[in-house]
Amino acid sequence: MARVAVAYRERKQVRFGENLFFVDSFEARDDRVSFMTRMLYNKDRPYTMTPANPWLLPAVEAVAGEGERIFAQQMRKAGL
């Protein structure tokens, strides 16, 4: 419960098992503690499906075209 309280206070995430949660509310009264969480990441699924966005295609192609130049530049910086 201490991890949940700190995550709520600092507005951070908390991990339970392999899943990542955001703490939406936390309340401690007497000997009772209650909190609500929202799942941010579920590691049970090995992949995600992202729908295609045609408006991103020109940017992706521009970066892909510069890949060899960037690689060669980084190799020169490393002295190789």
Image: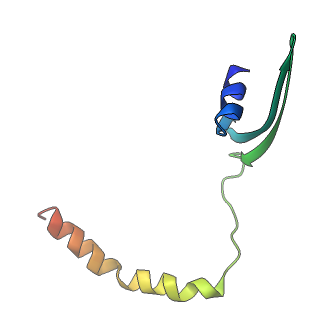
Identify the image quadrant of residue 19. top right
- Number of numbered discs: 0
* Residue 19 position (above or below residue 75): above
Residue 78: % across, % down:
16, 61
* Residue 62 position (above or below residue 30): below
Is residue 16 among the parts visible in the rendering?
no
Residue 2: % across, % down:
69, 20
* Residue 31 position (above or below residue 9): above
Horizontal relation, residue 35 to residue 11: left or right = right
How is the structure coloured here? rainbow
Residue 52: % across, % down:
67, 80
Q: In which quarter of the image is the C terminus?
A: bottom left
Which residue is located at x 30 percent, y 79 percent?
68
Identify the image quadrant of residue 34. top right
Identify the image quadrant of residue 15. top right
Which residue is located at x 58 percent, y 83 percent?
56
Q: In which quarter of the image is the N terminus?
A: top right
Q: Which of 9 and 49 is in front in this view?
A: 9
Which residue is located at x 42 percent, y 81 percent?
64
Residue 72: % across, % down:
22, 75
Which residue is located at x 68 percent, y 70 percent?
50
* Residue 30 position (above or below residue 67): above
Q: Which residue lies furthest to the top in this view?
A: 31
Horizontal relation, residue 75 to residue 67: left or right = left
